[in-house]
Amino acid sequence: MKINNAEILCVGTELLLGEVVNTNAAYISRELAKLGISVYHTSVVGDNPKRLSNAVKSALNNADLLILTGGLGPTYDDLTKETVAEALSLPMVRDENILREIEEYFASSGRKMPENNAKQADVPLGAQALKNRTGTAPGIFIEKDEKVVVLLPGPPFELIPMFEEFVFPKLREKSDKFLVSHNIHIMGMGESEVETHFIDLMKNSTNPTLAPYAKEGEMRLRVGALASSEDEGEKMCAEMIEKVRNTPVGEYIYALDAELIEKLVVDLLKEKGLTLSCAESCTGGYFGKRITDISGASKVFKGGFITYSNEAKIELLGVNPETIEKYSAVSPQTAEEMAQGARKRLKTDIAISITGEAGPDPDPATKQSVGTVFIGVSTSEDTFSIKLTIASQRDREYIRRVASSRAMKEIIKIIRKK
């Protein structure tokens, strides 16, 4: 049989109470997308046999594939296997091989297996048990009546290895499609403005598709293609990406499939053999923190200055007092002198500075509204600044995060010109 669509059902009252964040559904959805299997519905149900049974029966009526997570433990409320077996009219049988593996798992740590763990060796008749290399609850793979049902343990450190080793390869055999997708990262142009350039394309393109997603301080366009091979899907996506690049939006694209913009900055600096420094005022060290969160940043990032006061800007960076007096601390002139000072003192190829009004109340001395930020950029060839106007109704943290991201985008532009 071929699988076209799926539902995901996550079991556990702790998920409904918000005590545990449900990351399993997102992970499984991403993996199924790689296989060209569309997830039509995801849901969460508590540890209640009747509600779980209704959810299982409903999902099996609508989907080719049902994946359940959680409820495979040894306690009385772990009833996922039993409920699924009943819904499929399958008796439970004990698998002696699994029982032996569970006993060996406990013995390896010098413990005797509690009696209630034995129930984890019970499986629906005809089902295949999936070995759990990091825990005691085996997974279950069932095929019946043109349906596939997969039961996985709830803890991600058990679920993910099991899915990668056993489930993904099995599902690959049952899908003749490949979903290829790419994210176009855009900064400096809002979602509504981007949409005006592509509204017809978004509405009329079915394969590949083009869809907008808003993120904090930026947005992305997701290009997705469903194809009979990965190469075909890549070709379809490439054609759509090229269409996007050849529009006014193209100049605002800073990356394709960037995991984190700060990682992209570090990787590009390494690639070009360049060094970076920074001088921060309103961001209070947030820019430097994000850069140094990336492993290996020490190879390219020499350091930075947090010059929150005017005195610090003057004493540590060499900003001219007259510049601040004439133009204020939040000005293009001050931003440029801050960047120059950081680059010269730390002897780097590129320096970035950020100065602005993060709010919530504006400083009368700067004569700037909340959300006004100036980013200074200095290299051996040039020093310049750009002005940002960030939504003033947002909080201080939002303004700081967006300002630091925009500074990173400017660094990317500089690096790519070198």
Image (tube, grey):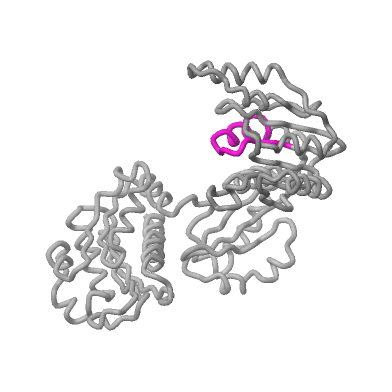
- Dividing the picture into quadrants, the one containing residue 367 is bottom left
* Residue plotted at (62% across, 33% down): 75
283 on left or right of 182: left
* Residue plotted at (66% across, 19% down): 99
132 on left or right of 297: right
Whether the magenta-drawn stretch holds residue 55 is answered as no
* Residue plotted at (51% across, 18% down): 111
Q: Which residues are magenta?
A: 150-168
For the C terminus, the image quarter is: bottom left
Dominant SS of magenta comes to: helix
Q: Is residue 392 above or below residue 5?
A: below
In percent of width and height, residue 238 lies at: 63, 53
In percent of width and height, residue 148 lies at: 78, 37
For the question of whether residue 227 can be seen, the reply is: no
67 on left or right of 283: right
- Toward the viewer: 12 or 244? 12
- Toward the viewer: 413 or 58? 58
For the question of whether residue 321 can be seen, the reply is: yes
Whether the magenta-drawn stretch holds residue 151 is answered as yes
* Residue plotted at (77% across, 44% down): 53
In percent of width and height, residue 386 lies at: 35, 71
Q: Is residue 181 above or below residue 334?
A: above
Q: Is residue 27 above or below residue 107?
A: below
